[in-house]
């Protein structure tokens, strides 16, 4: 593990850009800042991979929608209420339940995906014994393979 410490932002940005251009990923670097900085965030966003959470949420929403329609259709087929010649499976009333389950499953899958992708809960990382104060720090966890 290699640690680079900088007092000023400019040399920190130069070293960070050099490391990112050489191919280091988000799993190989840790960055500690004394304060939030949007310029650094924008630089890091260019090189680090995009989140897969949107696909997990989409899968949850689609499974919720199909579960809502399946639940209502199979319920109406199992206990038919034949009234005045109306069809047994009528889609418009089932849209409400399908919509609600789409929102519910999408939210639950998003929460689960967030916990999975951020590797939470990680009890060994709750307490960081390192304190860097007002320094800009780049920590290389693993060398590039």
Image: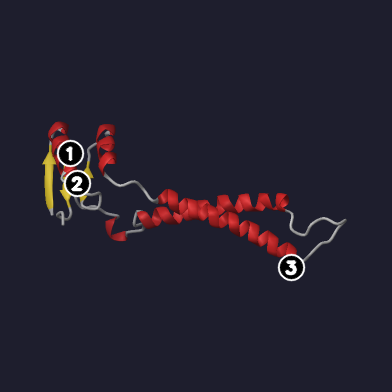
Q: Is residue 129 above or below residue 138?
A: below
Q: Quadrant of residue 123?
A: bottom left
Tell me residue 90's x, y (percent). Answer: 74, 54
Q: Which residue is found at the position 12% from the left and 34% from the top?
A: 11
Q: Residue 13, how many percent across, how many down?
A: 17, 35
**Mark sitting on residue 17:** 1
Of 15 and 135, nearer the camera is: 15
For this rendering, which residue is in front, 77 or 38? 77
Which quadrant, please, contains the N terminus? bottom left
* Residue 58 spot, x, y in % from top left: 49, 51
Q: Residue at 61%, 50% (x, y): give it.
A: 100
**Measuring 59% from the left and 57% from the top, which residue is drawn there?**
66
Q: Which residue is the site of mark 2?
A: 131
Mark 2 crowd level (few <14, some 14–19, many ≥20, 10 Å Cα):
few
The answer to which of marks 3 and 1 sits earlier in the sequence is: 1
Q: Quadrant of residue 141?
A: bottom left
Q: Which mark is residue 107?
A: none
**Residue drawn 66% across the image and 53% down it:** 97
Please say whether residue 26 is visible from this viewpoint: yes
Q: Which residue is mark 3?
A: 78
In terms of secondary structure, where does tag 2 sit? loop
Label 3 crowd bin: few (<14), some (14–19), many (20+), radius 10 Å = few
Q: Which numbered disc, 3 or 2, marks the residue that appears first in the sequence? A: 3
Q: Residue furthest right?
A: 84
Q: Nearer the viewer, residue 86 or 94?
A: 86
- Taking 16 as reference, is 101 above or below it? below
Whole-Å distance between the Cαs marked 1 and 2? 23 Å
Q: Secondary structure at mark 1?
A: helix
Give the spatial CA distance, label 3 vs label 2. 63 Å
Mark nearest the camera among 1 and 2 is 1
Dot 1 or dot 2: first in sequence order is 1
């Amino acid at each position: 593990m290699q640690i680079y410490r900088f007092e000023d932002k400019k040399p920190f940005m130069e070293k960070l850009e050099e490391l990112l251009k050489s191919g280091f990923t988000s799993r190989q670097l840790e960055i500690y800042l004394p304060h939030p900085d949007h310029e650094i965030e924008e630089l890091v966003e260019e090189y680090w991979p995009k989140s897969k959470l949107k696909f997990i949420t989409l899968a949850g929403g689609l499974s919720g929608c199909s579960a809502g329609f399946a639940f209502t259709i199979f319920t109406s087929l199992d206990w038919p209420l034949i009234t005045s010649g109306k069809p047994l499976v009528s889609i418009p009333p089932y849209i409400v339940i399908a919509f609600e389950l789409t929102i519910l499953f999408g939210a639950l899958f998003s929460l689960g995906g967030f916990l999975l992708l951020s590797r939470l809960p990680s009890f060994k990382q709750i307490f960081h014994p390192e304190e860097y104060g007002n320094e800009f720090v780049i920590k290389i966890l693993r060398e590039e393979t």
